[in-house]
Structures are given as structure tokens and as C-alpha cells.
Image (spheres, rainbow, N blue to C red):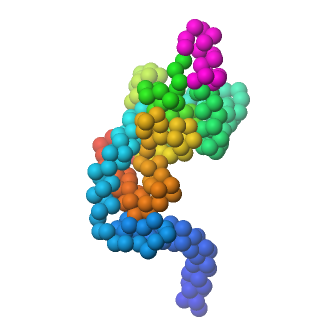
Amino acid sequence: MVGQNKLSKVVVIIGFLLPSLAGLLLFQLVPMLSSAVISFTNWDLLTPAKFVGIDNYSEALQDEKTLTSLLNILQYIVGYIPSVLIFGLLFAVLLNRKLTGIKLYRIFIFVPVITSWVAVSIVWRWLLNGQSGLINYLLSLIGVQGPVWLQDFVWAMPSIIAVSVWKDIGYVTVILLAGLQDISEDYYEAATIDGAGGFQQFFRVTLPLLTPSIFFVLVISLINGFQLFDQVLVMTGGGPAGQTSTLVQQIYGNAFQSYKMGFASAQSWILFVIIFLVTIIQQQLQKRWVTYDR
């Protein structure tokens, strides 16, 4: 009787999991395995695929546009990660205080996160327009002539970074705010008894105990950084002259515009390996600076 009850529970659990597992298999695992096979072929969607071995990988690793897009991603990450972490931490500390209307402030800062990237990119493309944009108009009021932001070799990538930070800062703030609220007041009481001031408590208590949340944000932000696409496609199209092109954009162009499915699949797996290795390195390095004891 007991065995039958256990069997029935297993059947029920499998029944609940089956739709999710079927979706995972159909829309995640099967496409991934298919792309791995396609990456070793030359296929244009119209003619039969031709096996070419590792030629697509060799070509991708030597392709100038691929290498340029990787360098652009590194430039983006170097500017984006510190900015979103610093401002996210600042807002998290401010929103952790007991202020009048604090819930409303939290809603305001999170609204950009739930807004479509396409909508956000279209609005910012207008704001950053060199001729009729609002930002350049405001700068002209104080006698400053703004650049053509999204078509300027110097300012195009910083503009993408700034917009990305603006949109994602709410997400980072919420994660860090949750981490702050999970820190016991006992630590601060003990630090106060020991004579630690506000700054000392922040750097000696708050930051060390917040490192798990910071680590999570760092991992997620790096993964998202390597997959930079939406805002680039809408705002700059990869220009000017490839200054903001990214690997995902290259994959999209090769697959759905040039119909080089094998080459695009090879690029996708190269990106996967890069993200995987970076994540593994982060997992190993966390042992040196992340504090889990509370």
C-alpha cells in the first residue's frame, strides 16, 4: 500500500513536470543540438546541407568582423558592468531607508526593466538624435554643441552603454536591495558597539555580506553583456562602420540575412564556449571574495 502511494506521487509529479520538460526539450535542447550539427555544414536553408567539418569554426575565428564584434563586446562590458553595479548599489542603499513614498520610488526605478527593449531603444534613438534630439537641445541651452551621438565613432558605444545602464539599473537595484534587507541588524549593532561609524560599517559589514548578491549580478550582467543585441540593432544597426556591432548581431545577419546557417551556428557555439568559460572562471574566483556566512 505504501509502495502504491509512493508510485502515485511519482506519477503526479511527472505529470506536473512533463509539460515543462516537453517545452524544454522541444524549444531548448533540440534547437541547441540541431545548431551543433548545422555548424559543421554549409547550408542556406534552400539547398541540401553539405558537410564541411570545422571550416566554419576556422573561418569564424579568423573573420575580422567576428573579432571586431568581440572587441566591441569587451568595450561594452568594461563600461557597463562597473556602472550598473555602482549605481545599482547606490540606489539600493537609498531605497533601503525608511522614507515617505519609498514604495513609489522603487516602482519608478523598476519601470524601465519591464519596458520592451525595442520601445526603449526607439525613444532613446530620438533623444540622442544629433539634429533634433532632446538631449542636444538641452545642451544647446547652456551653450554646448552635442555630437551626433549614435553616428559618432567616439560616442556611439558609450551611448549604448548609458542606455543599457539606465534600463537595467532597476533590476540590479532590486537584487542588491533584497541582499541588503537580508543582512541581520545584529551585525550593525555589534559594529556600533565596537565604535564603527557609518562608512566603516558599510565597507566592513555591508559590502562583505552583500557579496553573494553582487556575485549574482556580476554573473548575470556578464552573460547579458556577451549577448548584447536588441539596443544595438534598433539604435545603431552596428554602426558607425561596425563600431557597435556585436557577435549576436553578426549571428543574426549571417543566419537570417545572408542565409549562412552553418557559419552562424559556428559563431553561436563560439559565443557559448566563451560565456561558459567566463562563468566557470567566475565560479572559481568567487571563493576568494564572496562571503556566504551570515
Q: Residue 292: x percent and y percent?
A: 40, 46
Say whether residue 131 is visible.
yes
Span of residues in magenta: 130-145
The quarter of the image holding the C terminus is top left
* Figure label count: 0
Depth check, front residue: 124 or 282? 124
Instruction: Relative to 17, say whether 263 is above or below.
Output: above
Left or right side of 99 for 81:
left
At 48% across and 30% down in the image, what residue appears? 156
The residue depicted at 60 percent of the width and 33 percent of the height is: 125
Nearest the viewer among 225 and 213 is 225
In this picture, residue 38 sits left or right of residue 4: left
Residue that sits furthest to the front in the current view: 47
- Could you say where residue 30 lies in the image, as x and y percent from the top left? 48, 71
Quarter occupied by the N terminus: bottom right
Please state which of residues 165 and 227 is positioned toward the viewer in this rendering: 227
**The magenta stretch spans residue 212:** no
Q: Is residue 228 left or right of residue 72?
A: right
Q: Is residue 185 visible?
A: no
Q: Position of residue 35 (x, y in %)?
A: 43, 66
Task: Provide residue 117's location: percent of width, then percent of height.
Answer: 60, 43
Q: Is residue 279 left or right of residue 87?
A: left
Q: Residue at x 34, y 72 (%)?
A: 51
Hey, which residue is sitting farthest bottom in the picture? 1
Q: Nearer the viewer, residue 121 or 280?
A: 121
Instruction: Name which residue lies at 48% across and 40% down.
Output: 238
- 135 is within the stretch colored magenta: yes
